[in-house]
């Protein structure tokens, strides 16, 4: 959990799943990111995406509590991982204004 009066994300906050490593192996699901901030801004990304390989891992979970959101919502991702045999399902992104 990150708790701050202000968080400027110009890089990446990530909790992505790992990739599989072998014939028909599954990939890891994305993890969890929890932010409790007054102001969230920046040009970076927040990601909890599933890993990619033969079978994609599911997306993770992101929870953001904020007073002011100065970051476009498409920069906050919990996508399913790409897979040669099956794609992982999307995770969840929960944005809550305090």
Image (tube, helix red, strand yellow):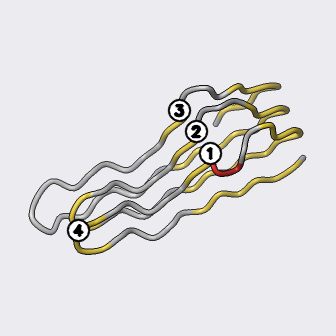
Q: Which mark is residue 75?
A: 1
Q: Looking at the image, is mark 1 or mark 3 earlier in the sequence?
A: 3
Marks 3 and 2, Cα distance to the nearest angstrom?
5 Å
The residue tagged 4 is: 84
Residue 41's spot in the image, x, y percent?
Answer: 75, 32
Using the image, tell me which numbered label, if any, was put on residue 45: 2
Residue closer to the observer: 32 or 81: 81
User: Is disc 3 surrounded by few (<14), some (14 to 19) or many (20+) residues within 10 Å?
Assistant: few
The reply to whether dot 1 and dot 2 touch (C-beta < 8 Å) is yes
Which type of secondary structure does the marked residue at label 2 adopt?
Answer: strand
Q: Quadrant of residue 26?
A: bottom left
Q: CA distance from mark 1 to mark 3?
A: 10 Å
> Relative to 36, is 74 above or below?
below
Q: For the point 54% across and 34% down, which residue is it?
A: 13
Sequence order check, earlier mark of 3 and 2: 3
Quadrant for the N terminus, please: top right
In this rendering, would 88 be left or right of 71? left
Question: What whole-number distance in Å separates the C-alpha atoms at marks 1 and 2?
Answer: 5 Å
Locate residue 23 relative to residue 3 in the image: left or right.
left
- Nearer-N-terminus badge (1/2): 2
Mark 3 and mark 2 residues within 8 Å of each other at the beta carbon = yes
7 vs 31, left or right, is right
> What residue sits right under mark 3 in the picture?
12
Examine the rendered structure and indicate whether residue 89 appears above or below residue 12.
below
Whole-number angstrom distance, CA of label 4 to CA of label 1: 25 Å
Is 54 rendered above or below residue 98? below
The structure residue drawn at horizontal position 81% and vertical position 40%, both measured from the top left corner, is 69
């Amino acid at each position: 959990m990150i708790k701050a009066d202000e968080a400027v994300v110009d890089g990446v906050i990530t909790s992505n799943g790992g990739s599989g490593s072998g014939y028909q192996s599954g990939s890891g699901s994305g993890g969890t990111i929890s932010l409790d901030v007054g102001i969230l801004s920046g040009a970076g990304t927040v990601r909890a995406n599933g890993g990619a390989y033969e079978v994609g891992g599911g997306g993770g979970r992101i929870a953001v509590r904020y007073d002011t959101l100065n970051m476009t919502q498409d920069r906050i991702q919990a996508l399913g991982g790409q897979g040669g045999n099956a794609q992982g399902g999307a995770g969840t992104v929960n944005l809550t204004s305090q």
